[in-house]
Image (cartoon, helix red, strand yellow):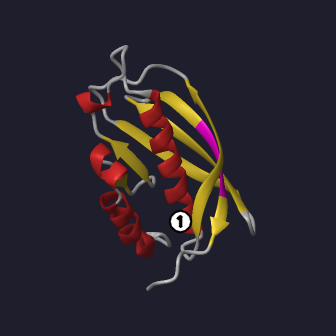
Amino acid sequence: MSSRAPHLQRLAELLTTLPLHDFLKLQLVEEPLGLRLPASPRLINGTGVVHGGILYSVLDVASFLALVVERPAQNAVTVDFSASMLRPAAIDQDTLVHARVLRAGKRLAHMDAEAWQAGQLVAVARVTKALINPPAAP
């Protein structure tokens, strides 16, 4: 069994319980771990391609998911985000987004994320998150 298997249910719940994730219809991809952003005309910007803000958001979410696998007992918030759009992302194609943890220290974690369509890299991001303890249960 994969070392990340126990965390897959938590990851799937995160994707279905948060309104933005639900609106985007994000889907968990297990191998390699990441996200699928389904094609949708709701994602369109004024030039007829996927809105860059949506790609930024999904790159950030994928970075968080990669971190949750390594640090399941912690939560994290984004403190720095830098992204480059490499080519337009078509609204009629699913986008696959994967991230990896470069380093997770005591207070900060650094991740790289990539968004792909039809085998072509469409966007990359470098994400830094501050590690925090999850809120206590009521």
Q: Within the image, what quadrant is residue 118 found in?
A: top left
Image quadrant holding the C terminus, namely bottom left
Main secondary structure of the magenta stretch? strand
Could you say which quadrant of the image residue 88 lies in? top left
Residue 27 visible here: no
Residue occupying the point 46% across, 84% down: 137
| Residue drawn 54% across the image and 73% down it | 72
Residue furthest to the top in view is 47
Mark yes or no: residue 113 visible: yes
In the image: residue 67, left or right of residue 30: right
| Residue 82 in the figure: left or right of residue 15 | right
Extreme residue in the bottom direction: 138
Q: Nearer the viewer, residue 113 or 78?
A: 78
Image x and y of residue 5, in percent: 42, 71
Q: Tally the marks.
A: 1
Judging by the rendered image, the residue that carries numbered circle 1 is 68
Observer-nearest residue: 39 or 119?
A: 39
- Give, as a three-letter code, the residue at label 1: Val
Quarter the N terminus occupies: bottom left
Residue at the image point whose x is 37% and y is 36% from the top: 95
The location of residue 123, given as percent across then percent down, is 52, 30
Identify the residue at image location x=52%, y=47%: 60
The span picked out in magenta is: 125-129
Q: In the picture shown, does residue 10 fall above or below 85?
A: below
